[in-house]
Image (spheres, rainbow, N blue to C red):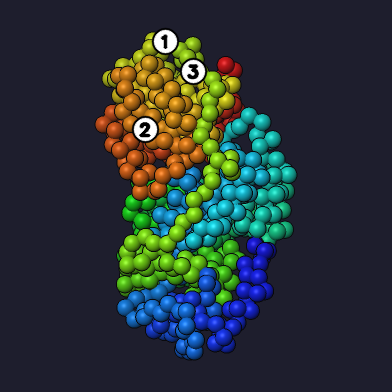
Amino acid sequence: MPERRLKWKSKQIREQIEVIEGKKSPSLLLKNARFLHAKLKQWVNGHIWIYQDRIVYVGNELPSNLESTEVVDCQSYVLVPGYIEPHAHPFQLYNPQSLARYASQTGTTTLINDNLMLFLLSGKKKAFSLLEELKQLPVSMYWWCRFDPQTVLQEEDQVFNHHDIKSWLEHDLVLQGGELTGWPRLLAGDDLMLLWLQEAKRLRKRIEGHFPGASETTLAKMMLFGADADHEAMTGEDVWKRLMQGYTVSLRYSSIRPDLPKLLEEMKKYPIEDYSSIMFTTDGSTPIFYEQGLLDKMIAIAIEHGVDPMDAYLMASYNVARYYGIDHWYGMIATGRIAHINFLESEELPTPVHVLAKGHWVKRNGAPCGEWPDLEWQNIGLKELSLDWELSYDDLHFSMPFGIEMVNSVITKPYSISLDATGDELSMEHDESFLMLVDRHGKWHVNTLVKGFATSVSGFVSSYSNSGDLIILGKRKEDMLLAFNRMKEMGGGIVLAEHGKIVHEISLPLGGVMSDQRMEEVIQQTKQLVKLLKERGYQHEDPIYNLLFFSSTHLPYIRVTPMGMYDVMKKTVLFPSIMR
């Protein structure tokens, strides 16, 4: 069982039994409910008794003791289990709490989260303290354990060491290892990573793959290594190939890969009649994308493309819970389960009117409600970025013979630099800009040019990046320094500067990576940033993901990393980072 600690103490279970016996009253009675029963795979009618956070009975009986019971007549609604996001990246400017709070309003009441930024920004003890703090939220939060950093780090073996990996895997709230962005290392003979996969299997935890474009033989090899699921299917054929090899498949609809409509149409070419090994994921989308919803949006798309509503709801709830071995607590409306329940106006409208999470209202009559505890972020290691060093003109030398060309939002390739980059600014007539990756401790930097980002961005700085280091980009060195100094003054953030003035900023005081504001505010701030960048010739879909992907070595072909300019295909450092 993934989580070994008991959810309810003996005294609590005795009280739950007393509710059945009429000695205590339920906290909440949902009368005359029509609800989705995942075990039966039927819409059934009955009454649902809830005591505190647990469903203690479903069926035709009504409680004899209603002394302290809130009674809700559900004849006007259809009830479904709370949705489960199996693949969240809760650090995309928003933070785990703000994402969870926002997600709950569209019915997603359980999230299974990436731990990468906690690995990079916080020691194990403080990270585990955060996991415990987040248990106090109305929603349920679980985690993965990364085996690789998704970039090339200096002293990577000290950050991703065996002792810490083992401790994460053994944690009660960690349900899986992965995602395996570093899977080519397995194929190349990395026995330490294989040991971690075997340890996850020994602990009966899942392994999440990351296999874009993988052939059938590669998928077979990764299954033999221990992979259980993959979210990188980009075509209907990819879905079919993964199902054939025995994978559970997450269909993706995200800001960088809004594939779901295409996948559903292409899947019709294959004899896929059973959806029980298929899930949904929004794959850690950036803030603006979530303005349209989360899993509720995916369910709606599935129904629009001919998926039976029952299958669509199960793909967003029970299928996920069963896959992770937590279906005794989540994914269905049945006795013994945690009371995560969405109230819908109809089967075809998956955005809930009311939401119960752990037996308490978090949304009522379309509006947020309930208490959300404040987290002491500084006490758990996520405090403002404090830089005790200065960036100067002496650091802004760009003499690299080649730079990085953005083919699209994801792919970057090398290109030969032909223009003179020795001056203080570049022309606004082309799409080449200065680009730096700078160690957050000020020890090293990598300087090059980037082609294809924008034509007239003067100074753009971000402490949000894939490695936790600083990205500095622009046409004018003076504005790049101005943006850097403002970011430093803020204690972390994203800053756009132009002609000696700050044009826009997003404060990221939590480790320099996350905002402490609610998601709604972060969405508006990010929308304004994208608008301003597009006005200055930004050419792609999602600049927030671009900031991640500059260093992401799980993508081809060339990346700027803490080690230097890195050739992903050859796995070599082309030019090392320079010590300051």
- Residue located at (28% from left, 28% from top): 536
- Residue located at (59% from left, 43% from top): 380
Where does residue 192 sit, x and y in percent of width and height? 72, 43
Can you say which quadrant of the picture contains the C terminus?
A: top right
Q: Is residue 277 visible?
A: no
Where does residue 245 sit, x and y in percent of width and height? 57, 60
Instruction: Please tell me whether mark 1 or mark 2 is closer to you in this view.
Output: 2
Of the pair 167 and 149, the residue shown nearer to us? 167
Disc with the residue nearer the chain's start (1 vs 3):
3
Q: How many marks?
A: 3
Instruction: Name the amino acid type tagged 3.
Output: Leu
How packed mark 1 is, by other alpha carbons closer than 10 Å (few <14, some 14-19, many 20 or more), is few
Q: Which residue is mark 2?
A: 505
Instruction: Name the element at disc 1.
Output: loop
Instruction: Name the amino acid type tagged 1.
Output: Thr
Q: Which residue is mark 3?
A: 391
In the image, is residue 441 above or below residue 242?
A: above
Disc with the residue nearer the chain's start (1 vs 2):
1
Q: Are marks 1 and 2 in contact (CB under 8 Å)?
A: no
Where does residue 254 sit, x and y in percent of width and height? 41, 50
Q: Are marks 1 and 3 in contact (CB under 8 Å)?
A: no
Can you say which quadrant of the picture contains the N terminus?
A: bottom right
Report how far apart the C-alphas of labels 1 and 2 lie in the structure: 28 Å
Instruction: Name the amino acid type tagged 2.
Output: Glu
Q: Which residue is mark 1?
A: 422
